[in-house]
Structures are given as C-alpha cells and as structure tokens.
Amino acid sequence: MRIPTSTEELRGGEVERYRKDLLRRGAAFAERLSELLAGQDATLADLPLVGQSGETPEDRLRRLLALVDEALHRIALQTYGRCTNCNRPLPRAALDLAPWTERCAECDHPLQHGSPPEETAGVERWQ
Ligand SMILES: [Zn+2]
C-alpha cells in the first residue's frame, strides 16, 4: 500500500482517526486536570510540552484542553490538517505526535526558516 506523502490532503478516514485520538487524549487531559484540582498529586512529567515554559501543570492542562477543543472545531469546519496561518497541509508526523497541531514548522518558528531541518529543533523533550 502506498503511503501518502506529508503534503497530500488528509482523507476522511484519517481525519476520523485524528478526531478519535483528540477525543481520547482530551479526555485524559480533563481527567488529569480534575485530579489535580481535587488536590491529588498529578505527575505531569509525561505531558507534552507545547512551546511554553514556566507555566504551572494546571496552566498546561488547560492549554492542552483548549488546543484539543480548537482542533475538534477545525475538524467540524473541515479545515483540520492545514496550517492556520499559511493554509498548507501539515505533516502527518506532526499530527501523529500532537493531533492538536495548528501551524506548520515554518509559521511556528519563523526565525528558523531557511535553517536545515533538525529532528529536535524547537521541540522540548518531555521525559
Ligand atoms: Zn504555516
């Protein structure tokens, strides 16, 4: 079976797969947040970092939930899978890693535009 390249449009089945992933991960974030708010010691070491440092675990969970909500909204509007800034298709690798991704690497890191791509460039580690 031919594997689609990253620049092709997402097909309906793929969008559905990302939608389920978003719902599943959104539910997990919501659960972690309610545990945190209930005073439980929530371990946040395994939460994805999405570009901001210095925020509290609660801030991060709320931001992730907002990102999941926005991504689901884009699915409803049928704009999911495209950069919200330049409208180019997002790489599947980025969506697989973080299905709430809203912007392509160039728009997310404009200062790095033109520099050679590096696997870890602009990505914080979360282990
Ligand atoms: Zn873009």
Image: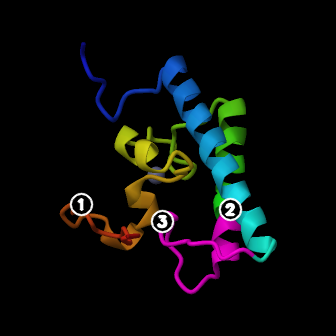
Q: Nearer the viewer, residue 33 or 97?
A: 33
Give the label, 2 or 1, closer to the camera.
2
| Sequence-first disc among 1 and 3 | 3
Position of residue 80 measured from the top left corner of the image (x, y, whole percent): 58, 36
- Does any portion of residue 66 appear in the rendered image? no
Q: Which residue is mark 2?
A: 32
**Amino acid type at mark 2:** Arg
**Amino acid type at mark 3:** Asp
The image's mark for residue 119 is 1
| Sequence-first disc among 2 and 1 | 2
Do residues under tags 2 and 1 come within 8 Å of each other at their CB atoms?
Answer: no
Q: Nearer the viewer, residue 45 or 91?
A: 45
Range of magenta residues: 40-63
Residue 59 lies in the magenta stretch = yes
Q: Residue furthest left?
A: 116
Q: How dense is the environment of label 2, judged by Cα within 10 Å: few (below 14), some, or many (20 and up)? A: many
Q: Nearer the viewer, residue 7 or 69?
A: 69
CA gap, disc 2 and disc 3: 11 Å
**At numbered mark 3, what does the secondary structure look like: helix, strand or loop?**
loop
Position of residue 59 measured from the top left corner of the image (x, y, whole percent): 69, 75
Quadrant for the N terminus in the image: top left
Q: Which residue is mark 3?
A: 46
Q: Residue at x 21, y 63 (%)?
A: 118
CA gap, disc 1 and disc 3: 19 Å
Q: Residue furthest right?
A: 38
* Lateral position of residue 88 relative to residue 76, left or right: left
CA gap, disc 2 and disc 1: 29 Å
